[in-house]
Amino acid sequence: MSISTGLPLLNAGLAINARRTIAILEHTQLALSLMIERESPEDAAELLKLAFRNVDAHHS
């Protein structure tokens, strides 16, 4: 996917700032994790378990 998305952007003269993109993803994930841990701590462990299940199912 990154090649099919990135190459047309590069050909058009646009570049993706990978460091900025990763920082945005990390910030979003950390903010959501913090909100879940504060507002619904009883669900935090199960959500993490489901996240890894989805990674294994869709990205292995």
Image (cartoon, rainbow, N blue to C red):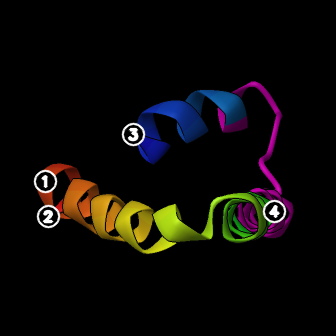
Instruction: Please tell me the numbered disc located at residue 31.
Output: 4
> Does residue 19 lie above or below 8 as drawn?
below
State which quadrant residue 27 falls in. Answer: bottom right
For image coordinates 74% across by 59% down, the residue present is: 39
Q: Please tell me whether mark 1 or mark 3 is closer to you in this view.
A: 1
Range of residues picked out in magenta: 10-28
Instruction: Please tell me the numbered disc located at residue 22.
Output: none
Q: Verify CB contact (< 8 Å) between mark 2 and mark 3.
A: no
Q: Quadrant of the C terminus?
A: bottom left
| Magenta stretch, main secondary structure class | helix
Mark toward the start of the polypeptide (2 vs 3): 3
For disc 1, the marked residue is 57
Q: Verify CB contact (< 8 Å) between mark 4 and mark 2.
A: no
Disc 4: CA contacts within 10 A as few (<14), some (14-19) or many (>=20): few
For disc 3, the marked residue is 1
Rounded to the nearest angstrom, the CA distance separating label 4 from label 2 is: 26 Å
